[in-house]
Amino acid sequence: MASEAIAPVQEKAQGPAADSAARAAWLICRAGAHLCAVPLAQVIEIMRGLPIEAVAGAPHYVRGLCIIRGAGVPVVDTGLLVGDQAVKSARLITIRAGKRTIALATEEVLGIRSIGTETFNALPPLLREAANETIAAIGTLDAELLFFLRSTRIVSEDLFNQLDARGARS
């Protein structure tokens, strides 16, 4: 799936749901017992798993680096990002994180869903506010918790700079 082939879906609700907010396209993936959603406009590519080289000093949810299209890309374990259990990654989802690229290690890609903001309001405010800075919102999808990821916050700029410096020394 190339970035040129991906167009974000923006819809306005019609009929009885006309009072709901605009809808956007999200890529839904499984991370252990959790579902995660990534804005489709930020998805670059979905691929099978690749060899990952561990990196010392990275946050616990960063598995390490892998070479994708000739560049070292940080790989984030989605299970550790949203919970406390590493995933058995079958797929990598490369996404734009600002001007950078990261790969999300996930068990399964479930597809694309058009989701409106009404989904974000499915949980009480206290639970939504408990999310860490990498989660933009929490909602439900088909009676399962759904974590909406904030891609620009998953890997800090400081970590990118550390990885860049290590690559320059190699």
Image (cartoon, grey):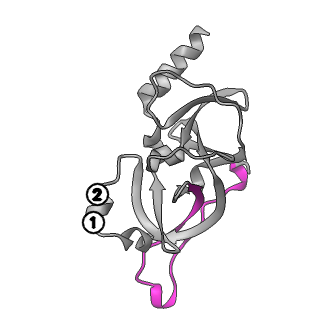
**Magenta range:** 3-31
Residue 169 marker: none
Q: Quadrant of residue 114?
A: bottom right
Q: Is residue 66 left or right of residue 60?
A: right
Residue 90 lies, with reference to residue 164, above or below; the image says: below
The residue lying toward the viewer, choosing from 167 and 98, is 167
* Tag 1 secondary structure: helix
**Dot 2 surroundings within 10 Å: few (below 14), some, or many (20 or more)?**
few
Distance between mark 2 and mark 1 Cα atoms: 6 Å
Q: Is residue 153 left or right of residue 14?
A: left
Q: Position of residue 41 (x, y in %)?
A: 59, 54
Q: Which quarter of the rendering shows the C terminus?
A: top right
The residue under the point 74% across, 51% down is 1
Q: Position of residue 65 (x, y in %)?
A: 60, 28
Residue 125 marker: 1
The residue under the point 50% across, 80% down is 13
The residue under the point 62% across, 50% down is 43
Residue 69 lies, with reference to residue 48, above or below; the image says: above
**Mark 2 sits on what residue?**
129
* Tag 2 secondary structure: helix
Residue type, numbered disc 1: Pro
Residue furthest top in the image: 169
Q: Position of residue 150 (x, y in %)?
A: 45, 49
Residue type, numbered disc 2: Glu
Q: Position of residue 106 (x, y in %)?
A: 61, 49
The residue lying toward the viewer, choosing from 27 and 96, is 27
